[in-house]
Image (cartoon, rainbow, N blue to C red):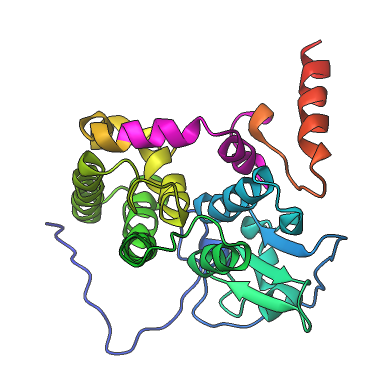
Amino acid sequence: MSDHAYVPPRVWKWEQPSGGTFASINRPVAGPTHDKALPVGKHPLQLYSMGTPNGVKVTVMLEELLALGHAGAEYDAWLIRIGDGDQFGSGFVEVNPNSKIPALMDHSTSPPQRVFESGAILLYLAEKFGEFLPDEHAERTETLSWLFWQMGSAPYLGGGFGHFYAYAPEKLEYPINRFAMEAKRQLDVMDRRLAESRYLGGDTYSIADIANWPWYGQLVLGRLYEAGEFLQVQEYRHVLRWAQEIDSRPAVQRGRMVNRTFGEPEMQLHERHDAGDFETRTQDRLDAEG
């Protein structure tokens, strides 16, 4: 226990800077900070996002739909650099008043339909194209339960464990321990489910898996927060089996690349406006390797 324990004031006040990664873009008020219209491409779906786990959910979903032959799922992916505050531009706030990625505009409807929150986007696309959401009532209900489990649980993994373990300006024992315990509890919840079922919703790959994999799948594959050893992720062998199976899907591999600005250069595709962008990116890498 610190000798100088924090005593909250009677009234909280916003005092900048708060320190830590992302401190410059966190604020206690909503709304735009500047005027900036969003670009609109040629395809029915316009995605404004970045290749974070929440962004990867949607690009994986879109790539899976295209792999099934749904031409209407062709999309333009526009990079929103959240570290630069692009999400506070007036055009983005019109699509998502919460100023968080991802955000989607569907121009195949009249008027165009905005969709925000990653889980809502997955559900919208699943219903629009009739894919990755079972028709049978019990399996559909189970799938939706795991979709919403992810939406409620992941903030403790990302905003809780990830923030204090990887991004906070100083390492503090209490919050790291508190959220490490919760992260491991969540992995145990998934591990027990996946011990009895191939996928989260049942026998069929669904939006529940697409939502959970970018967070928990990549965590056990060692791609989040460099925390695999700390959390002993190898203990969750059923989650690891599930994560590896999904990781092998070509659409998932493509979806990981879109709007990605970090990690291995060969896994980055800062924006996507045509299916041929993947082939162009691959050829650029081969040319660079010479």
- Residue 236, horizontal then vertical, whole percent: 23, 35
Left or right relative to 155: residue 190: left
Magenta span includes 245: yes
Residue lying at the far right in this picture: please name it: 42
Q: Quadrant of the N terminus?
A: bottom left
Magenta span includes 44: no
Would you identify the image quadrant in which residue 100 lies? bottom right
Marks counted in the figure total 0
Would you identify the image quadrant in which residue 2 lies? bottom left
Residue lying at the far front in this picture: please name it: 136
Nearest the camera: 163 or 209?
A: 209
Nearest the camera: 289 or 124?
A: 124
Residue at image point 69% right, 62% down? 48
Magenta stretch: give its range: 240-265
Residue at image point 51% right, 67% down? 123
Report whether residue 260 is seen.
Answer: yes
- Residue 267, horizontal then vertical, whole percent: 64, 32
Residue at image point 30% right, 38% down? 239
- Residue 121, horizontal then vertical, whole percent: 56, 66
Report whether residue 173 is seen.
Answer: no
- Vertical comparison of 280 with 51: above or below: above
Nearest the camera: 157 or 217?
A: 217
Magenta stretch, main secondary structure class:
helix
- Residue 69, horizontal then vertical, whole percent: 70, 47
- Vertical comparison of 246 with 178: above or below: above
Residue at image point 46% right, 75% down? 15
- Vertical comparison of 125 with 272: above or below: below
Q: Quadrant of the C terminus?
A: top right
